[in-house]
Amino acid sequence: MALYVVQSRTMFRKNKEELTDLQKILKPNEIGRDFDNVKAMFHEAGVDLVSAFDQVVTNSPDSTIVTLDVGCGTGSSIEHFLRVMGNRENLRNKALNTIGIDRNPLPHRIPDGILEGKDFRTQFMSADAHNLPLANESIHFGYSVALMRYCSDPLRVLEEGYRVLKPGGIMLWLLGGFTDISTYPHQDTIFKNTPGGQSFQEYFGEDDDHSTLACTKDPNLQFAGFPYILSFNFPNLRIRAVDKFRSHKVYRKQAP
Protein backbone atom coordinates (compact mmCIF):
# COMPACT_ATOMS: atom_id res chain seq x y z
CA MET A 1 0.00 0.00 0.00
CA ALA A 2 1.02 3.57 -0.42
CA LEU A 3 0.72 6.69 1.69
CA TYR A 4 -1.43 8.99 -0.37
CA VAL A 5 -0.07 12.53 -0.13
CA VAL A 6 -1.87 15.16 -2.17
CA GLN A 7 -2.45 18.87 -2.00
CA SER A 8 -6.06 19.88 -2.31
CA ARG A 9 -7.59 23.32 -2.00
CA THR A 10 -10.74 21.73 -0.61
CA MET A 11 -8.82 21.02 2.60
CA PHE A 12 -8.37 24.69 3.40
CA ARG A 13 -11.89 25.77 4.23
CA LYS A 14 -12.93 29.30 5.05
CA ASN A 15 -14.36 28.03 8.31
CA LYS A 16 -11.43 26.30 9.99
CA GLU A 17 -13.74 24.83 12.61
CA GLU A 18 -14.85 22.35 9.94
CA LEU A 19 -11.38 20.78 9.96
CA THR A 20 -10.69 17.86 12.26
CA ASP A 21 -7.90 18.08 14.81
CA LEU A 22 -5.87 15.71 12.67
CA GLN A 23 -6.20 17.96 9.62
CA LYS A 24 -5.15 20.99 11.65
CA ILE A 25 -1.93 19.23 12.72
CA LEU A 26 -0.87 18.05 9.28
CA LYS A 27 1.23 20.27 7.07
CA PRO A 28 -0.35 21.30 3.74
CA ASN A 29 1.71 18.77 1.75
CA GLU A 30 0.81 15.98 4.20
CA ILE A 31 -2.96 16.34 4.05
CA GLY A 32 -4.66 13.48 2.26
CA ARG A 33 -8.14 13.28 0.88
CA ASP A 34 -10.90 14.29 3.27
CA PHE A 35 -14.29 12.60 3.23
CA ASP A 36 -15.80 15.20 0.90
CA ASN A 37 -13.12 14.34 -1.67
CA VAL A 38 -13.77 10.61 -1.26
CA LYS A 39 -17.53 11.05 -1.55
CA ALA A 40 -17.12 13.05 -4.77
CA MET A 41 -14.71 10.50 -6.25
CA PHE A 42 -17.11 7.61 -5.63
CA HIS A 43 -19.96 9.64 -7.11
CA GLU A 44 -17.91 10.14 -10.27
CA ALA A 45 -17.34 6.37 -10.33
CA GLY A 46 -21.05 5.54 -10.15
CA VAL A 47 -21.78 5.08 -6.43
CA ASP A 48 -23.40 7.25 -3.77
CA LEU A 49 -21.22 6.55 -0.74
CA VAL A 50 -23.61 8.18 1.75
CA SER A 51 -26.63 6.22 0.52
CA ALA A 52 -24.68 2.98 0.78
CA PHE A 53 -23.73 3.81 4.37
CA ASP A 54 -27.33 4.73 5.20
CA GLN A 55 -28.48 1.38 3.80
CA VAL A 56 -26.11 -0.49 6.11
CA VAL A 57 -27.14 1.53 9.16
CA THR A 58 -30.83 1.04 8.46
CA ASN A 59 -30.54 -2.72 7.98
CA SER A 60 -28.17 -3.47 10.85
CA PRO A 61 -29.60 -4.52 14.24
CA ASP A 62 -26.31 -3.67 15.98
CA SER A 63 -25.98 -0.77 18.42
CA THR A 64 -22.51 0.14 17.08
CA ILE A 65 -21.65 0.62 13.41
CA VAL A 66 -18.00 0.03 12.47
CA THR A 67 -16.54 1.65 9.33
CA LEU A 68 -13.19 0.80 7.74
CA ASP A 69 -10.90 2.77 5.39
CA VAL A 70 -8.40 0.39 3.76
CA GLY A 71 -5.31 2.30 2.64
CA CYS A 72 -6.21 5.33 4.79
CA GLY A 73 -2.94 7.18 4.18
CA THR A 74 -2.91 10.25 6.41
CA GLY A 75 -6.13 9.14 8.05
CA SER A 76 -7.83 12.49 7.53
CA SER A 77 -10.53 10.94 5.35
CA ILE A 78 -11.78 8.38 7.87
CA GLU A 79 -11.48 10.82 10.77
CA HIS A 80 -13.51 13.37 8.80
CA PHE A 81 -16.01 10.60 7.95
CA LEU A 82 -16.55 10.09 11.67
CA ARG A 83 -17.18 13.78 12.31
CA VAL A 84 -19.54 14.20 9.35
CA MET A 85 -21.48 10.93 9.41
CA GLY A 86 -21.61 10.45 13.18
CA ASN A 87 -24.40 13.00 13.48
CA ARG A 88 -26.67 11.56 10.82
CA GLU A 89 -30.26 11.16 11.95
CA ASN A 90 -30.55 7.56 10.80
CA LEU A 91 -27.89 6.51 13.34
CA ARG A 92 -30.44 7.38 16.05
CA ASN A 93 -29.06 5.85 19.24
CA LYS A 94 -26.31 3.91 17.48
CA ALA A 95 -22.62 4.61 18.00
CA LEU A 96 -20.17 4.97 15.10
CA ASN A 97 -16.63 3.60 15.30
CA THR A 98 -14.03 4.16 12.57
CA ILE A 99 -10.86 2.24 11.70
CA GLY A 100 -8.09 3.37 9.36
CA ILE A 101 -5.57 0.85 8.03
CA ASP A 102 -2.41 1.55 6.04
CA ARG A 103 1.11 0.19 5.95
CA ASN A 104 2.30 3.53 7.24
CA PRO A 105 -0.61 5.67 8.44
CA LEU A 106 0.62 9.15 9.20
CA PRO A 107 -1.09 9.43 12.64
CA HIS A 108 1.36 6.81 13.94
CA ARG A 109 4.24 9.14 13.05
CA ILE A 110 2.97 12.29 14.75
CA PRO A 111 4.85 12.96 18.04
CA ASP A 112 2.85 12.36 21.21
CA GLY A 113 3.34 15.93 22.37
CA ILE A 114 1.48 17.22 19.35
CA LEU A 115 -1.31 14.70 19.83
CA GLU A 116 -1.83 15.63 23.48
CA GLY A 117 -5.29 17.02 24.08
CA LYS A 118 -6.51 16.20 20.57
CA ASP A 119 -9.74 14.27 20.21
CA PHE A 120 -8.89 11.49 17.73
CA ARG A 121 -11.62 8.89 17.90
CA THR A 122 -10.51 6.84 14.89
CA GLN A 123 -8.45 3.72 15.56
CA PHE A 124 -5.44 3.69 13.25
CA MET A 125 -3.58 0.45 12.50
CA SER A 126 -0.31 -0.07 10.67
CA ALA A 127 -1.09 -3.20 8.65
CA ASP A 128 -1.21 -4.71 5.17
CA ALA A 129 -4.43 -4.95 3.17
CA HIS A 130 -3.51 -8.51 2.20
CA ASN A 131 -3.78 -9.54 5.88
CA LEU A 132 -6.21 -7.32 7.75
CA PRO A 133 -5.76 -7.53 11.56
CA LEU A 134 -9.53 -7.74 12.04
CA ALA A 135 -11.87 -10.50 13.12
CA ASN A 136 -14.22 -12.24 10.72
CA GLU A 137 -17.48 -10.36 10.18
CA SER A 138 -16.45 -7.36 12.28
CA ILE A 139 -17.03 -4.47 9.82
CA HIS A 140 -20.38 -3.02 8.77
CA PHE A 141 -19.20 -0.62 6.07
CA GLY A 142 -15.89 -0.05 4.34
CA TYR A 143 -14.29 1.80 1.47
CA SER A 144 -10.93 2.04 -0.25
CA VAL A 145 -9.62 4.56 -2.78
CA ALA A 146 -7.15 3.67 -5.57
CA LEU A 147 -5.45 0.97 -3.52
CA MET A 148 -5.41 -2.02 -5.87
CA ARG A 149 -2.64 -0.79 -8.16
CA TYR A 150 -0.23 -0.93 -5.20
CA CYS A 151 -1.18 -4.47 -4.18
CA SER A 152 0.75 -7.54 -5.28
CA ASP A 153 -2.40 -9.67 -5.08
CA PRO A 154 -5.61 -7.62 -5.46
CA LEU A 155 -7.82 -10.71 -5.31
CA ARG A 156 -6.38 -11.54 -1.89
CA VAL A 157 -7.23 -7.99 -0.81
CA LEU A 158 -10.82 -8.46 -1.99
CA GLU A 159 -10.97 -11.74 -0.10
CA GLU A 160 -9.82 -10.03 3.09
CA GLY A 161 -12.36 -7.25 2.64
CA TYR A 162 -15.11 -9.81 2.19
CA ARG A 163 -13.93 -11.83 5.18
CA VAL A 164 -14.19 -8.95 7.65
CA LEU A 165 -17.61 -7.78 6.39
CA LYS A 166 -20.64 -8.54 8.50
CA PRO A 167 -23.58 -10.22 6.71
CA GLY A 168 -25.45 -7.41 5.03
CA GLY A 169 -22.36 -5.19 5.17
CA ILE A 170 -21.04 -3.22 2.20
CA MET A 171 -17.46 -2.71 1.02
CA LEU A 172 -16.68 -0.26 -1.80
CA TRP A 173 -13.45 -0.32 -3.79
CA LEU A 174 -12.71 2.67 -6.02
CA LEU A 175 -10.78 1.31 -9.00
CA GLY A 176 -8.54 3.14 -11.42
CA GLY A 177 -10.33 1.78 -14.47
CA PHE A 178 -7.99 -0.29 -16.59
CA THR A 179 -5.18 -0.68 -14.09
CA ASP A 180 -6.47 -2.10 -10.83
CA ILE A 181 -8.03 -5.58 -11.20
CA SER A 182 -6.92 -8.40 -13.43
CA THR A 183 -9.58 -9.66 -15.82
CA TYR A 184 -7.65 -12.55 -17.24
CA PRO A 185 -9.63 -14.70 -16.59
CA HIS A 186 -12.30 -12.05 -17.10
CA GLN A 187 -13.43 -10.35 -13.90
CA ASP A 188 -17.04 -11.50 -14.27
CA THR A 189 -15.90 -15.11 -14.66
CA ILE A 190 -13.79 -14.87 -11.53
CA PHE A 191 -16.66 -13.58 -9.44
CA LYS A 192 -19.31 -15.94 -10.82
CA ASN A 193 -17.17 -18.99 -10.18
CA THR A 194 -15.95 -18.03 -6.73
CA PRO A 195 -17.91 -18.74 -3.53
CA GLY A 196 -19.11 -15.36 -2.33
CA GLY A 197 -18.10 -13.72 -5.59
CA GLN A 198 -21.73 -13.31 -6.60
CA SER A 199 -21.84 -10.46 -4.09
CA PHE A 200 -19.56 -8.24 -6.22
CA GLN A 201 -20.87 -5.72 -8.74
CA GLU A 202 -19.03 -3.08 -10.75
CA TYR A 203 -20.49 0.38 -11.30
CA PHE A 204 -19.40 3.02 -13.78
CA GLY A 205 -20.06 6.73 -13.56
CA GLU A 206 -19.45 9.58 -15.95
CA ASP A 207 -15.71 9.08 -15.64
CA ASP A 208 -14.98 6.07 -17.84
CA ASP A 209 -11.50 5.71 -16.41
CA HIS A 210 -12.77 4.86 -12.92
CA SER A 211 -15.32 2.48 -11.51
CA THR A 212 -16.50 1.19 -8.14
CA LEU A 213 -16.40 -2.47 -7.21
CA ALA A 214 -19.14 -2.91 -4.64
CA CYS A 215 -19.56 -5.93 -2.41
CA THR A 216 -22.70 -6.52 -0.36
CA LYS A 217 -22.23 -9.58 1.83
CA ASP A 218 -25.11 -11.98 1.38
CA PRO A 219 -25.97 -13.52 4.78
CA ASN A 220 -26.80 -16.80 3.01
CA LEU A 221 -23.47 -17.24 1.22
CA GLN A 222 -20.39 -18.84 2.71
CA PHE A 223 -17.13 -17.42 1.39
CA ALA A 224 -14.30 -19.90 0.77
CA GLY A 225 -11.77 -17.51 -0.74
CA PHE A 226 -10.76 -16.57 -4.27
CA PRO A 227 -9.22 -19.62 -6.01
CA TYR A 228 -6.83 -17.48 -8.08
CA ILE A 229 -3.17 -16.62 -7.61
CA LEU A 230 -0.91 -14.03 -9.23
CA SER A 231 0.82 -15.64 -12.19
CA PHE A 232 2.94 -12.86 -13.69
CA ASN A 233 3.05 -9.14 -14.47
CA PHE A 234 3.12 -7.07 -17.62
CA PRO A 235 4.66 -3.92 -16.14
CA ASN A 236 4.79 -2.14 -19.50
CA LEU A 237 1.36 -3.14 -20.77
CA ARG A 238 -0.49 -0.11 -22.08
CA ILE A 239 -3.56 -1.69 -23.67
CA ARG A 240 -6.63 0.29 -22.58
CA ALA A 241 -9.18 -0.44 -25.30
CA VAL A 242 -9.28 -4.22 -24.98
CA ASP A 243 -11.62 -5.29 -22.19
CA LYS A 244 -9.85 -8.58 -21.53
CA PHE A 245 -6.63 -6.84 -20.50
CA ARG A 246 -7.72 -4.30 -17.93
CA SER A 247 -4.71 -4.85 -15.73
CA HIS A 248 -1.02 -5.59 -16.02
CA LYS A 249 -1.48 -8.31 -13.38
CA VAL A 250 -2.43 -11.76 -14.70
CA TYR A 251 -3.97 -14.47 -12.55
CA ARG A 252 -4.45 -18.18 -12.93
CA LYS A 253 -6.61 -20.63 -11.04
CA GLN A 254 -4.89 -22.58 -8.30
CA ALA A 255 -4.47 -26.31 -8.62
CA PRO A 256 -7.10 -28.26 -6.64
Image: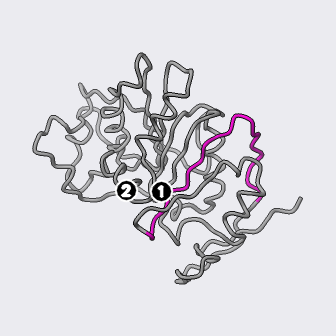
Would you say residue 212 sits in the magenta stretch? yes
Residue 244 in percent (x, y) is at: 65, 76
Helix or strand or loop: what does disc 2 sit on? helix
From which residue to which does the magenta span run? 208-227
Residue at the disc numbered 2: 41
Would you say residue 76 sits in the magenta stretch? no
- Image quarter of residue 41: bottom left
User: What colour scheme governs how the chains and residues are painted in the rendered image of this protein?
Assistant: one colour
* Magenta stretch: dominant secondary structure: loop
**Marks 2 and 1 in Cβ contact (< 8 Å):** yes
Neighbor class of circle 2 (other Cα within 10 Å; few <14, some 14-19, many 20+) is: many
- Amino acid carrying label 2: it is Met
Q: For the C terminus, which image quadrant?
A: bottom right
Helix or strand or loop: what does disc 1 sit on? strand
Nearest to the observer: residue 128 or residue 69: 69
Nearest to the observer: residue 244 or residue 117: 244
How many numbered callouts? 2
Residue at image location 24% in from the left, 42% down from the top: 23
Residue at image location 59% in from the left, 31% down from the top: 138
Residue at image location 16% in from the left, 49% down from the top: 12
* 26 relative position to 100: left or right: left
* 56 relative position to 108: left or right: right
**Relative to 91, residue 159 above or below:** below
Residue 133 in percent (x, y) is at: 58, 38
Residue at image location 51% in from the left, 37% down from the top: 141
Q: Residue furthest top?
A: 93
Q: Which of marks 1 and 2 precedes in the sequence?
A: 2
Where residue 174 is drawn, which disc sits there?
1
- Amino acid carrying label 1: it is Leu
Residue 200 in percent (x, y) is at: 63, 52
* 249 relative position to 44: left or right: right
Nearest to the observer: residue 208 or residue 223: 208
